[in-house]
Amino acid sequence: MLKNLKLKQKFTILLLVILIVGLSLSGSALSTLLRQNATNEIALRALTLIDTMTSIREYTLTQIYPELSLRLEEKFQPQVVSAYSAREVFEILRKKPEYRDFFYKEAATNPTNLRDKADSFEANILERFRKEKDLKQISGFRSLPSGDIFYISRPLSISQEACLQCHSTPEAAPKTMIERFGSVNGFGWHLNEIVAVQFVSLPASKVIEQANQFSLLIVGLVSAVFIVVILVVNIFLNRQVILPLKRITRVAEEVSTGHLEVDFEQVSNDEIGSLVRAFKRMKLSLEMAMKRIRRTHGGTSGNL
């Protein structure tokens, strides 16, 4: 089939094959790389959220709790609980479109509020943080009945003595707190103990979707650039190779039919130029041969 195609068509097919094969071979590696980049970008946003929630916890514990702690015996104020403040602020933040797919949880095996109860997966992460003291964060993907999610987590420890006023023993805790949450959960905590894990998560499809968007963008740009390259190569090939070869062919055909007055035009010093010089030498040799033939035939006619 290639024998029946013109030179420009062959070059175009070759470049298209290179494009298709190149995109196919690099597609998998590109997808993996972009997915990792998307994961890193989302992880960075998640860590920023965790840092923000940690700052809110610190502010609540050092600024809000001292002001409202005396009222706890009269009425329990959830606003003095740092975990409550962090959770509420995060829910406000989720009202913004760019954060609505993120979720926040302070998972503990012994929480005061059972909504913060860690499942088996979260409990394993908590236990790992307790055993590996130098471990600062863990991230990855996990499967849930609702779908896969991407998560990032950091340990949460008791760093302030004020926390133990509500979480050391039921006897030391405010009575209004006991009335609301009971005297079973959220006690027995110790200073500097890792008691919970801060989790920020979002559906894994969001990570994949972002990676796919980048993949399509890059593939589209590469394809567009390659198409431009194909067009430029075709224009260059047409001007520098195809048209000169056509001129050489036309002149050679005229010379072959006896029109020796036409001449080959040399416009470059490349291989095409070398071909033109070779044809010129051939034409010159042909002219000399024709002259010798005429002289020979002329001399023979005179003798006759």
Image (tube, rainbow, N blue to C red):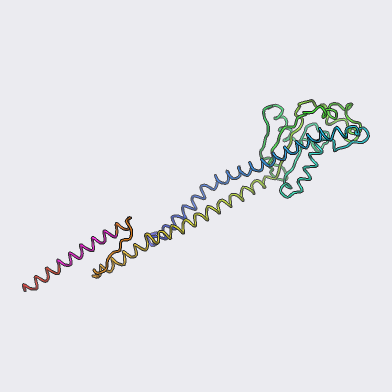
Residue 224 drawn above or below residue 149: below
User: Residue 117: percent from the left, percent from the top?
Assistant: 79, 35
- Left or right: residue 96 compared with residue 246: right
Q: Residue at x 60, y 49 (%)?
A: 214
Q: Residue at x 72, y 37 (%)?
A: 51
User: Residue 14: percent from the left, percent from the top?
Assistant: 43, 55
Exactly how many numbered labels are in the figure? 0
In the rendered image, the residue lying farthest to the left is 303
- Left or right: residue 213 compared with residue 187: left
Q: Main secondary structure of the magenta part?
A: helix
User: Residue 206: percent from the left, percent from the top?
Assistant: 67, 47
Q: Quadrant of the C terminus?
A: bottom left
Q: Quadrant of the N terminus?
A: bottom left
**Magenta span has 277?**
yes
- Left or right: residue 106 compared with residue 148: right
Residue 8 drawn above or below residue 169: below
Q: Quadrant of residue 12?
A: bottom left
- Left or right: residue 131 compared with residue 1: right
Q: Quadrant of residue 129?
A: top right
What's drawn in magenta, residue-wise? 276-292
